[in-house]
Image (cartoon, rainbow, N blue to C red):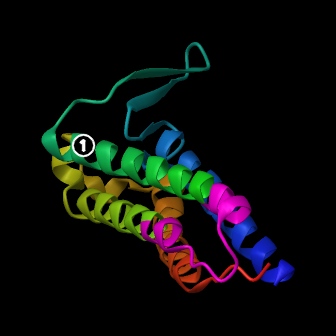
Amino acid sequence: MAFLLMTVTVLHLVTLAMLFIATMEKSWYSWGDRENTDLWYKCTFENSTGTRVCATARESDWLQSVQALMILSVVLSSISFMVFLCQLFTMSKGGLFYFTGLCQLFAGFAAFAAVLIYTFQRKAILQDPRELEMGHFGYCYILAWVCVPLLLVSGGLYVHLRKRV
């Protein structure tokens, strides 16, 4: 039981960290080493100064949807972890972690909706006159996709997890 509890806790913390990095880091779409964009900024590398210059991303309804869903996913996963810790110390023996699991499942569905919107609406989100085929998805986008099954699996584990001690 202790091993399962540790495994679920570590999985939750790793997923939460990955989700936070995917939301805040600057590489959702990239055009080589010169330019990349994320949910908040569009950054360009200037050769003359050797620095990155970042400007706020152009707002669109699709981008705001992705931003809101990713933030919702981080918040729900954080709430899920805090509730799990509270339930771990206050719940009676034999209780199930339903609320924790449902919060984690909804976090997974929110992240899934966000990456789907970004996938299918990237042209409207990026609003870039260049061809999108010249660029590629960045590591934060891939990290967000990896978080989706991890969130759903950990949510399912929480729903079936029973307090034994």
**Label 1: which residue?**
63
User: Magenta segment, principal secondary structure?
Assistant: helix
Q: Position of residue 116 (x, y in %)?
A: 28, 65
The reply, left or right, for residue 127 in relation to residue 139 is left
Residue 64 in the image: above or below residue 90: above
Q: Nearer the viewer, residue 77 or 138?
A: 77
Q: Nearer the viewer, residue 50 or 116?
A: 116
Q: Residue at x 45, y 28 (%)?
A: 44
Which segment is the magenta one? 84-102
The reply, left or right, for residue 121 in relation to residue 107 is left
Q: Position of residue 146 (x, y in %)?
A: 53, 70
Quadrant of image for the N terminus: bottom right
Residue 46 in the image: above or below residue 88: above
Report the label total.
1
Q: Residue at x 58, y 82 (%)?
A: 157
Residue 22 in the image: above or below residue 156: above
State whether residue 60 appears in this view. yes
Question: Tag 1's secondary structure?
Answer: helix
State whether residue 138 appears in this view. no
Find residue 91 and report its image quarter.
bottom right
The reply, left or right, for residue 90 in relation to residue 105 is right
Q: Residues within 10 Å of mark 1 (few under 14, many from 20)?
A: many
Magenta-span inclusion, residue 9: no
Find residue 143 and report its image quarter.
bottom right
